[in-house]
Amino acid sequence: MLHRLPFFKFLSVAQVALLANRHYRHLEPHERRRMAELVRKGMRTTPAERAELRTLVDKIDVRALLGGAASRISPLPLPKRLTGARY
């Protein structure tokens, strides 16, 4: 059993990566490019750019992404109120 544990970790990482990609694909290609530009700027963004980044991140539905990731990593089932999207 112990020699299989690393495989389950890799499997969990792969599942979370696929889930993140699915949420990232909610953005249009031009939005993905813009998000990458804003993230690369980091703390040098203007307040307007930060608002734009918040809008793009909101479109990804981070709550559902984090809830899905937590449910895939957790050995126990999590309540739907923690893992579901807000809408």
Image (cartoon, rainbow, N blue to C red):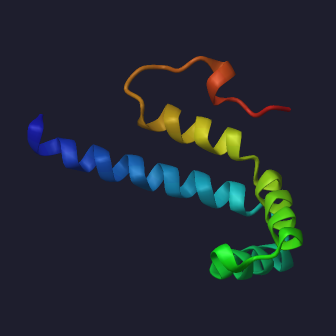
Q: Is residue 19 above or below residue 75?
A: below
Q: Is residue 84 above or below residue 39?
A: above
Task: Give the percent coordinates (x, y) of residue 13.
Answer: 41, 53
Relative horizontal placement of residue 19, taking residue 53 as reference (left or right): left
Relative horizontal placement of residue 50, taking residue 1 as reference (left or right): right
Q: Nearer the viewer, residue 62 or 23?
A: 62
Q: Nearer the viewer, residue 13 or 43?
A: 43
Q: Residue at x 81, y 77 (%)?
A: 29
Q: Is residue 42 above or below residue 26?
A: below
Q: Residue at x 80, y 66 (%)?
A: 50
Q: Residue at x 41, y 20 (%)?
A: 76
Q: Residue at x 70, y 54 (%)?
A: 23
Query: Where the N terminus falls, by quadrant?
Result: top left
Relative horizontal placement of residue 58, taking residue 69 as reference (left or right): right
Q: Nearer the viewer, residue 58 or 11?
A: 58
Task: Give the percent coordinates (x, y) of residue 47.
Answer: 84, 69
Counting the numbered discs, the total is 0
Task: Give the percent coordinates (x, y) of residue 71.
Answer: 51, 32
Task: Give the percent coordinates (x, y) of residue 44.
Answer: 70, 80
Query: Where the C terminus falls, by quadrant?
Result: top right
